Amino acid sequence: MMTRRNLLKVFVASLVFAVCDIWMYTSLLSSFRSYYETNSLREVSLFAKTAPQDPFYYEEWIARLPQELEGARGMVLELDEQWNFSPAASDPVAKAIWDTYHDSAEFQKGLESVYYLLPYKLSSPIKGMDGIQGNENSSGRWVYLLPVPDESGFDITGAVLIAIPEGSAVQFEGLLRTLAILAGLIFITLFAVGTLSRDPITGYGVLFLFGMAIAFVAYPLFEALRLTFIDAGVFSLTIWKRTFSPQYLVSLWGSVKLGIITASVSTVIGFAFAFLTERTGVRGKKLIGTLATMPVISPPFSLTLSILLLFGNNGLITHQLLGLQHVSIYGLGGLVLVQTIGMFPIAYMTLSSVLKSIDSTVEDAALDLRASRLRTFLTITLPLSLPGLLSAWLLVFTNSLADFANPLLLAGSYRVLSVEAYIEVTGRSNLGGGAALSLLLLMPTLTAFFAQRYWVNKKSVVTVTGKPTTRLAELATKPVRICLVAFVGLCLGFILILYGTIVAGCFVKNWGIDYSFTLSNIGEALARGKQALVSTVILAAIATPIAGLIAMIAALMVVRRTFVGKRILEVLLMTPFAVPGTLLGISYILAFNKPPLLLVGTAAIIVINYIIRELPVGLETGAASLRQIDPSIEEAAQDLGANTSQVFTSVVLPLIRPSFLTSMSYTFVRSMTAVSAVIFLISARWYHLTVQIYNFSENLRFGLASVLSTVLIIIVLAAFALMQCIVRDRGLTEKRIIR
């Protein structure tokens, strides 16, 4: 509550924490500086003792200095007959320091100390001396004057000047200062929300989501955006002028056209699959669901390779079996085919949970009033499914825009912007140009996002009212059911053919050239891919539950809560799905290769990428299900004394269990099959299975790639079965079909 007493509490607590924070910061800073100075002096003193007595070796000793003491520069000083120091050999940087400062009072004091065999460090770093090499060092250098004693150790024969960069110390002090400021801001914000807010848990949830979105979405993309305005180290609009040239606008329209067609076809197919499995009494639903989700289990380019090997210019079916000539799979048609196969499971998984959650009471009432099944479907079921349909369409559309693996192999002369951006980055090493082209893809995505949100917010689609229901009315007549089964069977048959090609490739020496049987691929692939396999499973297993829980919390906040900046938060959370993986990977490298979040090369950056990249799917799926649940259920629980967390865990989460499972399942499979972003983030310690498969495919080792793809599919299917056993359905969403 916003009262004077609570405001006073916040002020006093903030003041006390600020005092403690400053004390800890100054104490740690003092300890670090003392340790750094002692350690640096010891290192330079030890190295000074290696200074040669013979002038012939001076240059060699100075040349070795930067390798022994990272980035250091040095000078050898000799004593003349008047016992004055004069340079005998020097690095250009050290010579510039000597020429500029050797007459200063502090330098003379340091030389006097050296006379008495005492090392001396200048009181402040010297800045700007590296500019003579065209590389200005803004952080400066610490300068040490050290004696070179004779063999007895009681007399001086000369001295050395060693200048060490202060970069690492400055970076650590800056990191320490940043952490102190962040700690203060976090404490004050959390304490203020807990004290002044009517619903602290909601406030904490909103703060967490905003913090996550800013740190892992807005900040990396800002770094990429900043790069697009820099040309040759200065601010420039050259990159954007070239980005909006006609050739790239043609590619943008190609991406939009491909996305619209793919999203529309995929949504129709996904709805047909979902309707058959959730709203009819057909047998084998689990088998249909498993086969339907297989295209998202494999790496995105494996199905493309299968299509090329079967239907390409020299394909097994088109050329060798049917003898067709001048038939090309390249271009828009081939892209729509492969993207539809690979992406319709997204629509199916989204719509399946939506159709399962529909309360059929209204449908039963319409049928009791003698409405036909077709009219009931068109006037009740389809309108109730529209939020899910739009969500599925949007997810497929954004996924199609961001895809570069399939167009890279199948586009031919058809131009899409994702490939242009990928080539700009990897082929021309133009990070700014690739980032600009990738950012251009956000325009159609955000347009579709806002259009979808505008329509959904104008409609009311509440169907789950809290009244128990255990059945769904079957709206499909026998002819319709037969047509659906036939259509789904044809689609699944085609998918099985494609995957049969992958499995067959495990036992073929060289597909397309040498079809002789072999088992050598299995042993070689597993031996070479063992590390990548273990790393991929570990990272995906870590990211899956975290991403699922965050997605459901985000959906609850977006659908059920009203707060300042909700639209902005929605856009930030949905943005990663539209951003091409190449841009996201490059953005993470730019943002997290420096303090305070130095994550490049660690497992954390890969796990964070998984969570952020796949969060929009869980958000959209959860939001579509929450919009069907009457808020009065949650209000009743709150009236009975349940707090926000209890309402979420005991009421909301069980009701949206299908969406929760969908979110976790999708995150796991996409984490296991990620390519575009993770290819920039892997390290020697944390490799990825799909990158290994891609490397095998690129080197025409299709047999090895097929083995690893098959292993990946088996792992994901086993994970699906395990997930279903762990998160059992308690009967809240289990329904039977009534004809």
Image: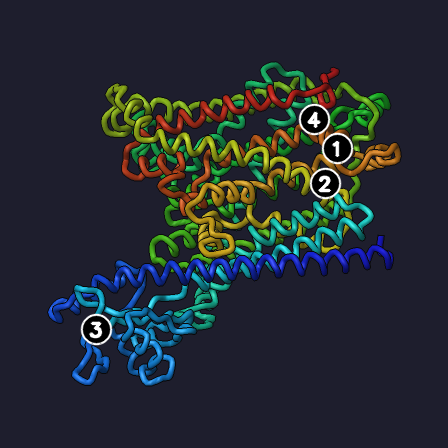
Which tag, 1 or 3, sits closer to the chain's start?
Answer: 3
Which tag, 2 or 4, sits closer to the chain's start?
Answer: 4
Question: What residue is rendered at 64% in x and 20% in y?
Answer: 481
User: Would you call the spot at circle 1 few (<14 residues within 10 Å), some (14-19), or many (20 or more)?
Assistant: some
Which mark is in front, 1 or 4? 1
Q: What number is the disc on residue 158?
A: 3
User: Would you call the spot at circle 2 few (<14 residues within 10 Å), some (14-19), or many (20 or more)?
Assistant: many
Given the current orientation, which residue lies at the most extreme right position?
639
Q: Of helix, strand and loop, which one carries label 1?
A: helix
Which mark is in front, 2 or 4? 2
Relative to 218, residue 640 above or below: above
Residue 703 seen in render: no
Q: What number is the disc on residue 652?
A: 1
Q: The disc labelled 3 sits on which kind of residue?
A: Gly
Q: Are marks 1 and 2 in contact (CB under 8 Å)?
A: yes
Q: The disc labelled 1 sits on which kind of residue?
A: Val
Label 2 sits on residue = 556
Q: Of helix, strand and loop, which one carries label 2?
A: helix
In three-dimensional space, the C-alpha distance between marks 4 and 3, rounded to whole angstroms, equals 86 Å
Q: Of helix, strand and loop, which one carries label 3?
A: strand
Which tag, 4 or 3, sits closer to the chain's start?
Answer: 3
x, y percent for residue 77: 22, 75
Which tag, 3 or 2, sits closer to the chain's start?
Answer: 3
Which tag, 1 or 2, sits closer to the chain's start?
Answer: 2
Question: What residue is rendered at 70% in x and 37% in y?
Answer: 624
Q: Quadrant of residue 142?
A: bottom left
Image quadrant containing the C terminus: top right
Q: In the displayed structure, does residue 730 sit left or right of residue 482? A: right
x, y percent for residue 200: 77, 46
In three-dimensional space, the C-alpha distance between marks 1 and 4, rounded to whole angstroms, equals 16 Å
Q: Nearer the viewer, residue 623 or 161?
A: 161
